[in-house]
C-alpha cells in the first residue's frame, strides 16, 4: 500500500512517468516502434522534397507528421503542404532542453515496428569526364607557350 501512495505522490509532483524518455526526446515526442519514415534536419533543409516522404504520407494517411519546431517554418512548409494535400495531421515539436538530429518523421499512435525508417541520402552518380580534343589542345598549348 505504501508503494502505491509513494507512486501517487511522485506522479503528483513530477507528472506521469513516460516510457522510454530518451527515445521520446530523440524522436520528437514519439517512440521508434511507431515511426514509418524519418528525415534528419540536414535532409529537411535540402532544396526540394524527398519523394519517399510524400509516398509514405500518401500511403499512411492515419499517421501524424511530426516536424522539428527548431527548423524555420519556411523550410518545413514544403512538407506541411504535402500533409495538407493528403489530409494528414501534422505537429510542430519544439524541445528547448534537448537538441535532436531528427527533422521530420511520420508516425502512428501505435507500434508498427518498421525496421528501416531512415531515408538514405541519394548518392550522386558521377559520369566519367569525357575529354575532347579541343580541351587537350588547349592544355598542351598552355604548357608549351
Image: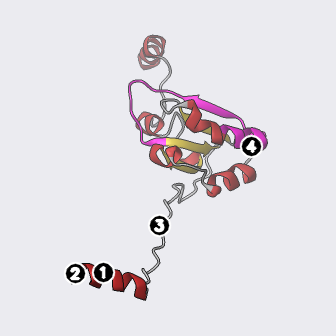
The dot on residue 62 is 4
Percent coordinates x, y for residue 22 in the rendering: 40, 36
Answer yes or no: do the residues labelled 2 and 3 have beta carbons within 8 Å? no
Estimate the spatial distance between the alpha carbons at disc 4 and disc 3, rounded to whole Å: 31 Å
Estimate the spatial distance between the alpha carbons at disc 4 and disc 1, rounded to whole Å: 61 Å
Taking 128 as reference, is 116 left or right?
A: right
Estimate the spatial distance between the alpha carbons at disc 2 and disc 4, rounded to whole Å: 66 Å
Badge 4: few (under 14), some or many (20 or more) residues near its Cα, within 10 Å?
Answer: some
Secondary element type, mark 3? loop
Q: Magenta region: which residues?
A: 80-102
Front residue (pair 51, 66): 51
> Of discs 4 and 3, which sits in the foreground?
3
Residue at the (47%, 78%) spot, across then down = 127
The numbered mark, 4 or 3, whose residue comes first in the sequence reads 4
Taking 48 as reference, is 24 left or right?
A: left
Q: Which residue is mark 2?
A: 143
The numbered mark, 4 or 1, whose residue comes first in the sequence reads 4
Estimate the spatial distance between the alpha carbons at disc 2 and disc 3, rounded to whole Å: 36 Å
Q: For residue 28, say whether it is visible.
A: yes
| Farthest residue, direction front | 145
> Of discs 2 and 3, which sits in the foreground?
2
Secondary element type, mark 2? helix
Answer yes or no: do the residues labelled 2 and 1 have beta carbons within 8 Å? yes
Taking 25 as reference, is 114 left or right?
A: right
Amino acid at each position: 500500500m505504501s508503494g502505491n501512495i509513494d507512486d501517487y505522490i511522485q506522479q503528483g509532483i513530477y507528472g506521469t512517468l513516460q516510457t522510454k524518455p530518451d527515445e521520446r526526446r530523440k524522436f520528437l515526442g514519439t517512440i521508434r516502434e511507431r515511426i514509418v519514415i524519418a528525415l534528419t534536419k540536414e535532409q529537411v533543409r535540402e532544396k526540394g522534397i524527398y519523394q519517399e516522404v510524400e509516398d509514405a504520407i500518401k500511403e499512411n494517411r492515419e499517421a501524424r507528421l511530426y516536424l522539428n519546431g527548431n527548423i524555420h517554418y519556411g523550410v518545413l512548409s514544403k512538407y506541411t503542404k504535402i500533409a495538407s494535400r493528403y489530409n494528414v495531421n501534422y505537429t510542430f515539436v519544439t524541445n528547448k532542453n534537448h537538441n535532436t538530429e531528427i527533422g521530420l518523421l511520420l508516425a502512428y499512435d501505435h507500434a508498427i515496428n518498421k525496421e528501416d525508417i531512415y531515408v538514405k541520402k541519394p548518392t550522386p552518380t558521377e559520369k566519367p569526364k569525357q575529354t575532347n580534343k579541343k580541351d587537350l589542345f588547349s592544355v598542351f598549348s598552355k604548357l608549351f607557350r
